[in-house]
Amino acid sequence: MSVSSERAGRRPTIKAVAAAAGVSTAAVSQAFNNKGRLSEATRRRILDTALELGWSPSASAAALRNARTRSLALVVRRPTDVLGSDPHFSELITGIEGELAPRGYGLLLHLVSGHREENALYERLAAEGRVDGAVLTDARDDDARPALLARLGLRDQGAGIAEAVTHLLSLGHRRVAYVSGPPELQHTRVRRAAFEGALREAGLRPFAVLPTDFSERRAVGATEALLDSADRPTAIVYANDSMAVCGIGTAQRAGLAVPRDVSVVGYDNLPLGSWLHPRLTTVDQQVQRVGAAAARMLLALCGEEVEDTALAERPRLVVRESTGPAPA
C-alpha cells in the first residue's frame, strides 16, 4: 500500500504500520509505549514509518490500555454435553491458563449454542469492556478468523491427516473412511482435503466421508453405518480422539477386534488415547501449545513482554497400537 493511497483513503491502521515496518503489531505498540526489548534502530524505523503513514495511537486506545481488565475471553460454540465429554478444550484451557496466570490475567469462559449467540456475546463483552481480548475457536469458512491461525504459525494443518493416510496405506489399507467434524468449520475442510488428496495420490478414493457434530451419538452412528457396509472399511480416521474412542468401543461391541479387523486413527493426541487398550494412534496437534501461543499473542497485544508466539512444528502422527496391517 502506498503512502498516498493510505492518506487518500481511510485512516491508516496499526496493522498497516506493522506491515510497512516489517514488524508485528505488538512491536508497534511497544515502540509507542517505550516498552519491550526493541532495538533503537527498530524502534526508530517503526516511529518513522508511522509518521510517514500519518498514524498515531488514538486517545481512546491509550485510555483502554491504561484501564485493562486483565481478563481474556474464550467463547466455545458447543453443546454442553459434547464439551463435557471432549477433553480437547481442557487441554486448550490448560495451555492458555499456563500463560495467563503467572501474569495476573484471568480467563472468562463462555459456552454458546450457535453463531448468533456467539456474535452477540462478542458484541456484549466489547460494549461492557469486560475483557481485553478473546481467544477464537472453530474458525469457519465464512469468517475472517483463519487469518489468526496463520499469525499463530499454524500452517500446514492437513499434514497430520496426510501422514495418517500414508501410514495406513503402508499397512496395506485401501478401504479407508473418514468421520469428520461439522462441514462449516475451516479445519474440517482443510483436513478433509488432506485426507482425500493423500488417497488420490495413491490412486484411491475415500470409502466414505461422514460429517458429525463431534457428539458421542453421531460418532457411534457413523461408525455403525460404516461397519454395516458391504465390504466395510479396513481403517477409519476420526476428526478427534473422543470420537475415535467411541469408534473403538462400537467396533468391539460389534465383535470386531482393533486393529485386527479395523484400524482406528484419532486426532488431538489427548491423554485418554494412551490409556486405552489398544492405545490410540493419533495426530498430535499440540493442543496445550496452541492455547499457550494464542494467550501469548493476546498478551503481546495488551502490551505485555512475551516471547515469540509462533509454533514451529506442524501436526504429526503418533503411531500406537490401534493401527495394524489390513485384514486379508
Image (cartoon, rainbow, N blue to C red):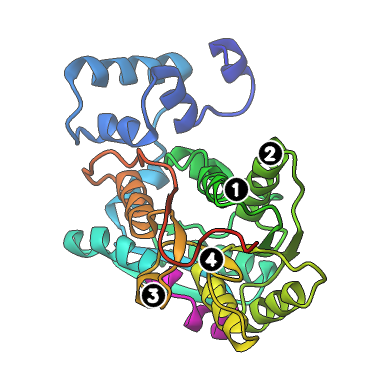
Q: Are marks 2 and 3 in contact (CB under 8 Å)?
A: no
The numbered mark, 4 or 2, whose residue comes first in the sequence reads 2
Tag in front: 1 or 3: 1
Give the total of numbered labels.
4
The residue labelled by disc 3 is 272
Q: Are marks 2 and 1 in contact (CB under 8 Å)?
A: yes
The residue labelled by disc 4 is 240
Residue 128 can be seen, yes or no: no
Residue type at the position of mark 1:
Leu
Residue 290 can be seen, yes or no: yes
Residue type at the position of mark 2:
Ala
**For the residues marked 2 and 3, what is the alpha-carbon distance in whole angstroms?**
32 Å
Is residue 171 rendered magenta in the image?
no
Q: Residues within 10 Å of mark 4 (few under 14, many from 20)?
A: many
Is residue 81 rendered magenta in the image?
yes
* Drawn side of residue 54 relative to residue 91, left or right: right
The numbered mark, 1 or 3, whose residue comes first in the sequence reads 1
Residue type at the position of mark 4:
Asn
Is residue 228 positioned above or below 281 on the image? below
Q: Which mark is residue 23?
A: none
Residue type at the position of mark 3:
Leu
Q: Residue at x 72, y 59 (%)?
A: 183
- Across and down, in percent, residue 144 comes to 62, 45
**What is the chief secondary structure element of the magenta stretch?**
helix
- Across and down, in percent, residue 206 comes to 74, 53
Q: Residue at x 41, y 78 (%)?
A: 277
- Seen from the viewer's position, the closer of residues 109 and 176 is 176
The residue labelled by disc 1 is 169
Is residue 222 positioned above or below 168 on the image? below
| Magenta region, residue range | 79-90
